[in-house]
Amino acid sequence: MATYDIEADGLRGLNAALQQLAGTTPNEPWEVVNPRGSHAIAVGLDAPLDVTIKGSTGYYCAGMNKQATIRVAGSVGPGVAENMMSGTVIVEGDASQYAGATGHGGLLVIKGNASSRCGISMKGIDIVVHGNIGHMSAFMAQAGNLVVCGDAGEALGDSLYEARLFVRGSVKSLGADCVEKEMRPEHLELLADLLERGGCDARPEEFRRYGSARKLYHFNIDNAY
Amino acid sequence: MTDHDPRIPRTAPIQSATFSNPINAEIRRAAATGIYDIRGGGAKRRVPHFDDLLFLGASVSRYPLEGYREACGTNVTLGTRFAKNPIELDIPITIAGMSFGALSGPAKEALGRGATLAGTSTTTGDGGMTPEERGHSAKLVYQYLPSRYGMNPDDLRRADAIEVVVGQGAKPGGGGMLLGQKIDDRVAEMRTLPKGIDQRSACRHPDWTGPDDLEIKILELREITGWRVPIYVKIGATRPYFDVALAVKAGADVVVIDGMQGGTAATQDVFIEHVGIPTLACIRPAVKALQDLGLHREVQLVVSGGIRTGADVAKALALGADAVSIGTAAMVALGDNDPKYEAEYNALGTTAGAYDDWHEGNDPAGITTQNPELAARLDPVEGGRRLRNYLNVMTLEAQTIARACGHNHLHHLEPEDLCALTMEAAAMAQVPLAGTDWYPGKPGTGY
Ligand SMILES: Cc1cc2nc3c(=O)[nH]c(=O)nc-3n(C[C@H](O)[C@H](O)[C@H](O)COP(=O)(O)O)c2cc1C
């Protein structure tokens, strides 16, 4: 186990060391101590690394991750795992705004709650939130799956494209062009897999599925406001 | 109907300046369709511009340099503030970001080829980086846009600089729209969206708002790229003094400021013509912001929006820019709006020089299209050569002017080399009205 103390040795050294492993298959896990809300921790990784951050982080933790498994034993600030391409990011606590924003792939698991705009503009990432999510989540979400075991805030899935949204609890309101859709067997199967990978014991049958009505796909004045 | 008495002269029919023919046509079009007009290009109305400035040239009080004999440097280095590898360019004219999607693959390749031959950089755009443009651009700036279409950390690491796009001069505060006609399989796949649908690009970034967040975003981009490449921040010209100051505070190595004449691939006409300020009006406040921070020339300023000639380049530099950037002019050099396609422009209901339906994908010149047959009309090698020639001519023109003003580098041009033809231009450029030592709005009155 390699241990890195951000407070003592600085952010640059950590990211440089982790990024240097790009293209390798490291087998030694990394533990990062004293994050104390620092921004941009463990960003731009590109190797099947196993990194645990012992504490809470600031903005953009695990940003643009590829391949690595990054665990945060704490809560995260805005934009965790933004634009992730692949790999896994697990947050033990809560997440601030824009969790998983524009993510193209990989899995983001938030064991607590996520704030507003969770999954904004997501482009293929899978996001599993054990708790609730805030308003405007999955805004303009293009592809991927967002699973919410708790409740969703206002305007869920506004201007949604092809992303699939699964919510177990209540949805305060749906955004423009977002509608409830039938849960078919293939969706239950997909959801079962996501719940398992996200470490949730909820049953797929308890969820409702939301998706795009696809009415905004072509510019039409009657849809503008 | 009463007969007209021939002894009484008729009143002449007078067209209204307010309700002009183009305005009335637009009212009728709006009434018929219920949809605002979307088009490409920049502001078409006349606004104070570089044409309203003149160079004074050397005489008794200053002496000139010999036209073809005495050296006049043109190189520029961008990104000297924090980046380990600043961008070194032979000429202070760069190619602005234009998306693959808005432009065809061969057009992007031609831009890369031309820029490389001329010793300058080119820029990606909304929609991501294509292998063709990376392969043909010796120096490629990667745009980081609100839509994050095609955004990929591998491309980020392949870039020679990163440009965080906050706004464009054609539409400060606005997003984008790529109509379905232009979304073929490749464009759709790069943007992770279904083929053929109209694609909106967001007007602000999904994971930050405001200057304090931007500072953290820039930190993240630097951490991902190891502090190697310069980070530019591109803004549409609106409140240049404050926006430039805040971009610098957020950590920009280079600030790109784009005036209202700047082109766009597709935006509402009302946005293009009525939001933002002219290029001429934004340079002095931008330079003042850098000077007040003690960072003029350390954070480089790139100006764009309506740059067409070496005179425009020289004027922008004289007002304090470090470099300029061109979009529309580069397209024209490749063949956009060429009268040789007049019959086809006519068939599209327009004429060469006025064609601006770049969003529709029917470009006779094969530049703003994804239709393979039309795109094949542009030979990227020949296009690159034409762009190189044009960039060389602009550079020679700017050098000619600089030598005439007695300078051995384009960056030695200064406001004192200029005078203005109009009161507006004098006020905006803060150079005296020709033949006087006076301009409206002396410095110190604030912006
Ligand atoms: C066809 C076209 C596409 C453009 N696409 C982008 C873009 O993707 N991102 C961006 O920041 N600016 C874009 N722009 C604006 C240019 O980067 C630049 O600001 C502008 O063209 C400069 O003004 P000029 O056209 O008068 O030279 C585009 C402009 C044109 C003409």
Image (cartoon, coloured by chain):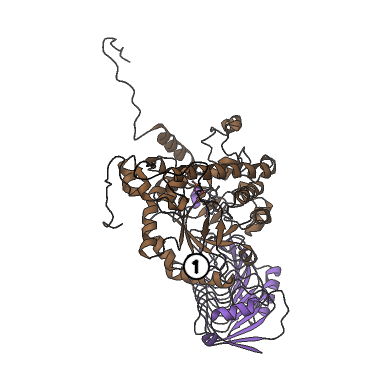
Chain colours: A purple, B brown
Percent position (x, y) of residue B407? 44, 49
Q: Quadrant of residue B244?
A: bottom left
| Circle count | 1
* A16 to B326, vertically: above or below: below
Depth check, front residue: A160 or A23: A23
Mark 1 lies on a secondary structure that is: loop
- Residue A90 shows up from this direction: yes
Quadrant that contains the C terminus of chain A = bottom left
Apparent side of residue B283 relative to residue A224 in the rendered image (left or right): left
Percent position (x, y) of residue B27? 42, 38
Q: Which residue is mark 1?
A: A136
- Residue B308 shows up from this direction: no
Cβ of mark 1 under 8 Å from ligand 1: the answer is: no
Percent position (x, y) of residue B136? 66, 53
Quadrant that contains the N terminus of chain A = bottom right
Look at label 1 and name its amino acid: Met
* A76 to B258, vertically: above or below: below
Which chain letter matches label 1?
A: A
* B243 to A99, vertically: above or below: above
Query: Residue at image x 53%, y 87%?
Result: A8
Query: Residue at image x 55%, y 75%?
Result: A80
Percent position (x, y) of residue B129? 63, 58
